[in-house]
Image: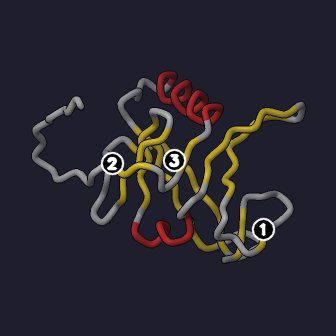
């Protein structure tokens, strides 16, 4: 078993396995986007916020500063993920995927906690 040690002046939450997963297709696209932005050491923040036609909507953004206060950190397929304390309960077991179709591509979230979703798949009710 190999361990890495790093010294940091700010506390970092441990990276937890398996809470949110990222498919290989999504991981490849995320790594590509991070590389294009020159942010290869950054991760992806996954969050839930009020809004959308079903009550809640998903959000994804590049997170350069790492875990914030109370955040949970995860790693899936080589991608660092950060989730705030409010979003965590809505995203347990969720999967981030990237779908490329003839009309375009985009990230999708498959969420087992959603009791209903809208037609676009970007908002849900829990």
- Judge from the rendering whether residue 90 lies leftward or rightward of residue 54; answer left or right: left
**Residue at the spot 14% in from the left edge and 35% down from the top edge:** 5
Mark earlier in primary sequence (3, 2): 2
Upstream in sequence: badge 2 or badge 1: 2
Q: How is the image coloured?
A: secondary structure
- Give the secondary structure at mark 1: strand
Total marks placed: 3
Decide: marks 3, 2 in contact (CB < 8 A)? no
Q: Is 104 on the left-hand or right-hand side of 98?
A: right
Identify the element where label 3 is drawn: strand
- Whole-percent x, y for residue 25 in the image: 65, 32
Dot 1: few (<14), some (14–19), or many (≥20) neighbours within 10 Å? some
Residue matched to label 3:
61
Gap in Å between the C-alphas at discs 2 and 1?
A: 29 Å
Please give the name of the residue rendered at 47% of the width and 51% of the height, measured from the top-left corner.
Answer: 18
Residue drawn 30% across and 66% down? 70
The crowding category of the residue bearing disc 2, from other C-alpha atoms within 10 Å (few below 14, some 14 to 19, many at least 20), is some
In the image, residue 107 lies at what x, y percent? 68, 43
The alpha-carbon separation of the residues under discs 1 and 3 comes to: 21 Å
Outermost right residue:
102
Distance, label 3 to label 2, CA atoms, is 18 Å
Q: Residue at x 60, y 30 (%)?
A: 29
> Marks 1 and 3: which is nearer the front?
1
Classify mark 2: helix, strand or loop. Answer: strand
Q: Give residue 117's mark.
A: 1
């Amino acid at each position: 078993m190999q361990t890495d040690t790093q010294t940091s002046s700010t506390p970092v939450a441990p990276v937890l396995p398996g809470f949110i997963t990222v498919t290989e297709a999504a991981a490849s696209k995320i790594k590509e986007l991070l590389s294009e932005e020159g942010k290869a050491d950054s991760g992806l923040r996954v969050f839930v916020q009020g809004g959308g036609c079903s009550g809640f909507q998903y959000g994804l953004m590049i997170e350069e500063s790492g875990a914030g206060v109370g955040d949970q950190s995860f790693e899936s397929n080589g991608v660092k993920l950060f989730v705030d304390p409010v979003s965590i309960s809505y995203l347990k077991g969720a999967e981030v995927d990237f779908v490329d179709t003839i009309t375009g591509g985009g990230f999708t979230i498959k969420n087992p906690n959603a009791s209903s979703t809208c037609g676009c798949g970007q908002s849900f009710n829990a």
